[in-house]
């Protein structure tokens, strides 16, 4: 009985010791885990064996590890177990126990992956009905919370607390000047130190200053304490008594307890002895793998988009025919890249494995790449400040009106450089001036580009765009009078040629014959083969809207008229169709006529002069002053051509007629007599010859109309250029003229109380400018001169005026070029493409130079932030 009594006493004593140790462990764990989790752990602790070295702690570890189950397929569970064992060998014995526990409870299910990472700071629970991928501590989320305590939420989660502990308290620059209140008091750096009796100073690492609220916080109490002191809640701003307040606080038991909790957690995280260390290592490895996969997928998407290739095929599966360019590129890269090879292996091995190779992920990645490019371009526009907009519209293959938006600015990153950024297509259901102006203003507001910094606008010559009352340019000028309107120079040249061609019946008939030639040969492959056998240059059709492109259609007739005529004669001999035979015969006679050869030489010379100017104007770096000089040179060339051009054309036409063995003679036509309505009207004076009549009715009419139209249609561009003319001609102007033109420029760039420059200071800057390397310099050359000499700060008003001058557009060629990409991207087979996808693909394709500097990490981070992902990235 005595032995049994003693045994019972020993049992009761040991039970009390176990309960005491259990409550001690529970008190320690309460610092980091919710109470409801520990309540569940008590039941597990009660069943723990008496010889367990960790006692109840092992039960809590088992509980927490069971919550960290990675539910995957059987192969994934095996991979996780082996990886856990490999990682456990590098950690301490206690971490190894945790690893084995985590591996032992790994199970395989058919549901979605549930990855929950636990730390000393938080415990996350999960349900089996949904996929949860929430990491309590992950390096990607370390910087999720601001380091300023004033920005912290009222309740910090475990991962936020752990991230803040790893980064530690923020510190200020020693040169930082604290703001003073009205009474002259402020915080000072000496409060960051505690002065001891012996004169030594101990730094108060827990004391943090908030620049947002101009207050100080106790960093550790803000993290681990729930007190109501101002150092914990709203921050202490009592600079009069701050010394006494800090001394009282640092001696309080609550503060000491918070410091101890802070240091314990920090030490545990640094030594890697947190409960989730092994799981965190596996999570980080998985995250790196997914990021490597996404880098390759983004590179493939970017490559296909830049080349305007289709992504999808008739199948959306790997290793099958007709699965599209995207999956074929993935398969090709997987043959040489181990990352994609392993990714495809897992995708084939696991039916429900997340692959990120589907059409939905393609659209999301395309959108993320386009968004990052737009952010980069918008940042460049905002840095340059001043910009101009270029707009043009066209219908796509699905009969949707697409408006191309291009921004022109002067980049100062590596030196003055004119850049034009394509900002995307906008669906424009309302093509009126009001609809288009509201559409572009809304788009600029969405991008964060202030329209008040717009200094130029350029469109074609459509009534809805250039209308003086209700056009887009008029409505935008009402919003911003400094947004100067410059009509498209190339489109204006087209109208010049079009107006000239309509003034003469001979000219209209000439282009009709040229089009008939192309139609006849292109109607049958046999006729086209005959043409290729005779002529080295093939015929080309001409465009109704691009008149300067007609020079390409008449080049074969200009250089090889006799060979084209021989091809027509052979077509006449070979064909059995009487209609074709008659048409070929009439065209051959027309080409061999003296009248046609004169028209051919005249039109080729006129179109060649205008075509050269048009191509130069379409350059993205063309400046307004250079463009106006080119127009003046073209006009002078036409004036000079009018004096001698017809005689030269007659000589050239005579030589060609002799080569074709036809008579160089114009047929005389009966002169038509006009009836006189009044007796005082004089009779019509007949021309002396048919050649003279052709010179008057054709050559003079066409050239005079071109010269006059050139002057009239470019008058608005000349007026805008005159406002900035002082920047190019100040060396040849007297002081009074410089002063007058500078004042005019100042008024142009002013509205209300706002002004871009001080015209009086501009006058002094122009007068004190150093000797220039050339007598006449363009605005961009002068801008580069100031930049290279590093004297921009000496001439700020001139610097601003030159930047605005270079920002003004000359043509809408960049918007026209985007239409070419539109036709390549949205084809007949891809006509159902969504607007968002079309917009992103066009941005990637057109702005490929900006895309070459794209950061893949930024795209991946944007992709991860869109919504919760099954994979850790």
Image (spheres, rainbow, N blue to C red):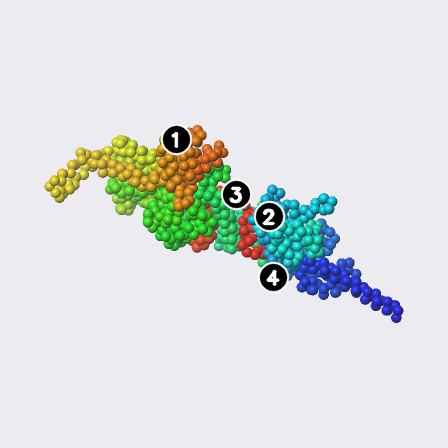
Per the rendering, the mark at residue 111 is: 4
Quick one: 212 or 712, which is closer to the camera? 212
Residue corresponding to mark 3: 853
Residue corresponding to mark 2: 185
Quick one: 159 or 539, which is closer to the camera? 159
Point out residue 255 in the picture as x, y percentages from the top left corner.
69, 54
Residue corresponding to mark 1: 731
Instruction: Tell which tag, 4 or 1, sits nearer the viewer.
Output: 1
User: 743 above or below 254?
Assistant: above
- Upstream in sequence: badge 1 or badge 2: 2
Separation of residues labelled 1 and 3 (CA atoms): 41 Å
SS for dot 4: loop
Q: Residues within 10 Å of mark 3 (few under 14, many from 20)?
A: few
Q: Residues within 10 Å of mark 2 (few under 14, many from 20)?
A: few
Instruction: Tell which tag, 3 or 4, sits nearer the viewer.
Output: 3
- Upstream in sequence: badge 1 or badge 3: 1
């Amino acid at each position: 009985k005595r032995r049994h009594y003693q045994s019972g006493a020993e049992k009761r004593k040991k039970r009390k010791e176990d309960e005491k140790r259990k409550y001690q462990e529970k008190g320690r764990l309460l610092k980091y885990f919710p109470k409801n989790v520990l309540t569940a752990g008590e039941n597990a602790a009660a069943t723990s064996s008496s010889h367990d070295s960790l006692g109840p702690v092992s039960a809590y570890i088992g509980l927490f590890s069971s919550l960290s189950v990675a539910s995957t397929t059987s192969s994934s569970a095996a991979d996780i177990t082996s990886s856990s064992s490999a990682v456990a060998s590098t950690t301490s014995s206690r971490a190894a126990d945790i690893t084995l526990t985590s591996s032992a409870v790994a199970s395989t299910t058919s549901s979605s992956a549930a990855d929950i990472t636990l730390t000393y700071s938080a415990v996350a629970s999960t349900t089996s009905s949904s996929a949860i991928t929430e990491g309590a501590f992950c390096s990607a989320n370390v910087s999720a919370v601001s380091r300023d305590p004033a920005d912290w939420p009222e309740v910090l989660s475990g991962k936020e607390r752990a991230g803040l502990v790893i980064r530690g308290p923020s510190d200020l620059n020693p040169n930082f000047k604290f703001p003073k209140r009205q009474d002259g008091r402020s915080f000072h750096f000496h409060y960051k130190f505690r002065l001891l009796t012996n004169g030594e100073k101990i730094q108060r690492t827990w004391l943090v200053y908030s620049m947002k609220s101009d207050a100080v916080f106790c960093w550790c109490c803000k993290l681990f304490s729930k007190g109501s002191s101002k150092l914990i809640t709203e921050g202490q701003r009592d600079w009069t008594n701050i010394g006494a307040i800090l001394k009282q606080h640092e001696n309080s038991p609550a503060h000491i307890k918070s410091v101890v909790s802070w240091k314990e957690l920090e030490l545990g995280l640094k030594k890697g002895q947190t409960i989730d260390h092994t799981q965190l290592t596996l999570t980080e490895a998985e995250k790196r793998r997914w990021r490597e996969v996404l880098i390759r997928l983004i590179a493939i998407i970017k490559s296909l988009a830049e080349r305007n290739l289709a992504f999808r095929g008739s199948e959306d599966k790997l290793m099958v025919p007709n699965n599209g360019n995207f999956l074929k590129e993935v398969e090709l890269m997987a043959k040489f890249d181990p990352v994609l090879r392993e990714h495809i292996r897992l995708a084939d091995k696991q039916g429900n494995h997340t692959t990120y190779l589907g059409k939905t992920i393609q659209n999301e990645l395309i959108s993320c790449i386009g968004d990052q490019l737009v952010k980069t371009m918008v940042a460049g526009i905002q840095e340059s400040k001043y910009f101009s907009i270029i707009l043009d519209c066209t219908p796509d293959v699905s009969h949707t009106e697409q408006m191309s938006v291009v921004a022109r600015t002067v980049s100062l990153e590596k030196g003055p450089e004119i850049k034009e950024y394509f900002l995307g297509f906008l669906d424009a259901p309302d093509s009126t001036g009001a609809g288009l102006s509201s559409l572009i203003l809304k788009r600029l507001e969405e991008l964060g580009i202030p329209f008040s910094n717009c200094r130029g606008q350029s469109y074609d010559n459509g009534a809805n765009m250039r209308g003086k009352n209700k056009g887009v340019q008029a409505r935008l000028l009402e919003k911003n009078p400094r947004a100067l309107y410059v009509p498209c120079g190339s489109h204006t040249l087209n109208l010049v040629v079009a107006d000239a061609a309509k003034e003469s019946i001979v000219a209209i008939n000439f282009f009709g014959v040229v089009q008939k030639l192309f139609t006849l040969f292109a109607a049958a492959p046999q006729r086209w083969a005959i043409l290729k056998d005779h002529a080295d240059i093939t015929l080309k059709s001409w465009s109704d809207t691009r008149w300067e492109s007609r020079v390409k259609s008449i080049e074969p007739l200009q250089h090889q008229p006799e060979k084209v005529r021989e091809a027509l004669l052979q077509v006449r001999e070979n064909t059995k169709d009487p209609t074709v035979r008659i048409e070929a015969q009439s065209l051959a006679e027309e080409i061999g006529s003296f009248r046609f050869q004169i028209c051919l030489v005249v039109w080729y010379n006129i179109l060649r002069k205008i075509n050269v100017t048009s191509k130069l104007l379409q350059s993205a770096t063309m400046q307004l002053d250079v463009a106006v000089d080119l127009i003046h040179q073209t006009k002078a060339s036409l004036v000079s051509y009018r004096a001698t051009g017809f005689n030269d054309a007659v000589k050239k036409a005579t030589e060609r007629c002799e080569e074709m063995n036809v008579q160089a003679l114009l047929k005389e036509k009966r002169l038509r007599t006009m009836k006189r309505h009044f007796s005082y009207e004089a009779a019509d004076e007949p021309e002396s010859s048919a050649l003279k009549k052709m010179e008057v009715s054709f050559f003079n009419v066409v050239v005079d109309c071109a010269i006059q139209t050139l002057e009239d249609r470019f008058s608005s561009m000349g007026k805008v250029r005159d406002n900035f003319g002082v920047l190019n001609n100040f060396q040849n102007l007297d002081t009074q003229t410089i002063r007058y033109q500078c004042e005019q420029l100042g008024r142009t760039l002013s509205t209300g109380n706002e002004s871009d420059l001080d015209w009086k200071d501009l006058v002094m800057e122009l007068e004190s400018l150093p000797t220039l390397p050339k007598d006449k310099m363009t605005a961009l050359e002068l801008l580069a001169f100031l930049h290279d000499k590093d004297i921009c700060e000496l001439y700020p008003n001139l610097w601003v005026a030159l930047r605005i001058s270079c920002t003004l557009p000359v043509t809408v060629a960049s918007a026209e070029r985007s239409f070419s990409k539109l036709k390549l991207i949205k084809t007949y087979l891809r006509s159902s493409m969504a607007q968002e996808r079309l917009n992103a693909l066009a941005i990637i394709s057109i702005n490929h130079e900006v895309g070459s500097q794209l950061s893949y990490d930024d795209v991946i981070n944007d992709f991860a932030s869109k919504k919760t992902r099954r994979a850790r990235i």
